[in-house]
Image (cartoon, rainbow, N blue to C red):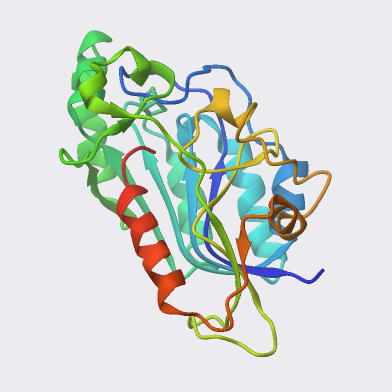
Amino acid sequence: MGKINLQNLSLIVTNDCNLNCAHCMGGCKNSTDMNKDVIDTTLSQISSIHSLSICGGEPTLALESLNSILEFIKNNDIKIDIFNTTINGTIYSNDFLNIFRELNEYVDTCLFYISSDIYHDNEVKRLNLKKKYVENLIKYRKSEFYYGVRKLNKNLKLFNEGNAKNLDSSLTVDIKPIKVYLTYIDSKNKFDKNGQCYIGPMITINPEGIITEYEASTEHQNTIYNYGSVLEESIEENSLKRGRVLIPRKFDKATEKEMNRYNRIKTLIK
Ligand code: SF4
């Protein structure tokens, strides 16, 4: 199988975090970081990614993983349109910003958000970190890569995973596996008879290399959403094996509708 083009790829670089927000769907706090082997094996299957999202845990605690991603991008022919992440703002890291500076030479757009919502705010206050958070926010805002605070959409429900299981049930909704679409399109989202491979809506790789979905807690990633490991088979082979793959004759309305539906629900939780 050849290299693939992805619309969205999410790498969960760590499960570690210095906070423990009431809505966090992580569900498993430990210090597992994504290692170089998982990063190289994943990225070497890919020729282009429209949006590469770095998830956690707290990404500023996984600098070695971020450096490994940077090194791969620097030394290999991989096109990335947008490199993005969200941090919790309680840790100021020059090393994190330096990685962004270097990445910016190889990626079209680099950006990061800082979380700001009722759950993060409560946790920051509980840990007496509000002053530090505000100081960090002021410093981070000077960075050319700072894109703004990231809020929760009040009209969308949280996923009933991890810590969020303890919230009022009216605030949460159960997650379900998402269909995977395998189509053959070019980099402009047009059907490509020559057979470029595209997998969407969102493929997520967790720190251990498990292929899963973004809306799945760490607990689920190790159970029902464990679709296999990048260390054992390619993302493309794995998607084909799952049997929930649609190969349309063209990039048609049904695929577009499904992608739009997905884009509406994907924005809740980092
Ligand atoms: S929501 Fe983010 S900041 Fe809060 S505990 Fe989870 S990973 Fe940490």
Q: Is residue 84 left or right of 250 when viewed as pictured?
A: left
Q: Residue at x 53, y 61 (%)?
A: 200
User: Which residue corresponds to the image point at 75% horizontal and 46% vertical from the top-left?
Assistant: 230
- The percent coordinates of residue 105 (x first, y second) are 51, 68
Q: Is residue 50 above or below residue 98?
A: below
Residues 55 and 128: in front is 55
Nearest the viewer among 184 and 5 is: 184
Left or right placement of residue 219 versus residue 17 in this view: right
Ligand 1 sits in which quadrant? Answer: top left
In the picture, measured across the screen, residue 95 lies left or right of residue 23, that is: right
Q: What residue is rendered at 68% in x and 41% in y?
A: 227
Residue at the image point whose x is 45% and y is 39% from the top: 215
Q: Is residue 242 visible?
A: yes
- Residue 110: x and y, percent? 42, 60
Image quadrant occupied by the N terminus? bottom right
Residue 52, given in percent of the width and then of the height, sits at: 51, 56
**In this rendering, is residue 43 above or below 64?**
below
What is the total number of numbered labels drawn onto the structure image?
0
Q: Position of residue 116 (x, y in %)?
A: 21, 34
Quadrant of the rendered structure where residue 170 is? top left
